[in-house]
Amino acid sequence: MARRRGWHRCRPAARYGATVHLWHVSGAYNAPYARGVVADARLVRLWSREAGLLVAPGNPRRVRRAADLGGLRVARRPVGTGARSLLDRVTGEAGIVLDASDPEVPRNLDIALAVASGTADAGIAARSVADRFGLGFVSLAWEPVDIAVGGEALGWPRPAAARVAQRARAESGSRRSAATT
């Protein structure tokens, strides 16, 4: 039997959860998607992350906002990812249509590599990715990152969920401070 990934792990009676950071057209993050898959989904806030445009060091193309992406090569994540959702939203709001031949890559790491190598002029990822690769960064949004779990199916163990969130925040903070030293 194939191993289930992502949202399917969050289905009723499952013992797993899925992390989520997706903007919905309603303006809400995460809940509309989680509840669309699992009616009794519960969200536990893990942290918030700063998402934006990764650009070459020194920002030679002078990208300051999504409207500046017109005519540039923009690496993008696949449809259904948080980064792609944000890219589609900000370019749509700016009236920008990206070139369909721009590279689509599977991971945030690949966005950074495309920008660092010059294959792309920009791409969306978290600030931490830009920092790790010495790239420029243009902030677009702060995104909440939650874990979605099937509420009633798990008996919604609030103390356990709180411990998971507390540990995730602590580990995230240690990684951030280790990256800055």
Image (cartoon, helix red, strand yellow):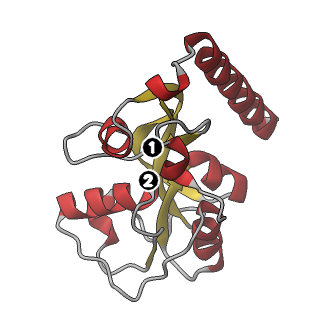
| SS class, disc 1 | loop
Which numbered disc, 2 or 1, marks the residue that appears first in the sequence?
1
Residue at position x 44%, y 53% from top? 82
**Label 2 to label 1: alpha-carbon separation:** 6 Å
Residue at the top extreme, as displayed: 159
Expressed as whole percent of the image width and height from the top left, the position of residue 53 reads 46, 58
Q: Are the residues flagged by discs 2 and 1 in contact, CB closer than 8 Å?
A: yes
Quadrant including the N terminus: bottom right
Which quadrant of the structure image shows residue 80? bottom left
**Of the residues shown, which amino acid type is indicated by label 1?**
His
Which residue is at a point 43% across and 80% down the rendered structure image? 73
Question: What amino acid does circle 2 point to?
Answer: Gly
Q: Mark 2 = which residue?
A: 82
Please state the horizontal and vertical placement of residue 84, each as a whole percent of the image.
40, 62
Quadrant assignment, res 14: top right
The dot on residue 114 is none
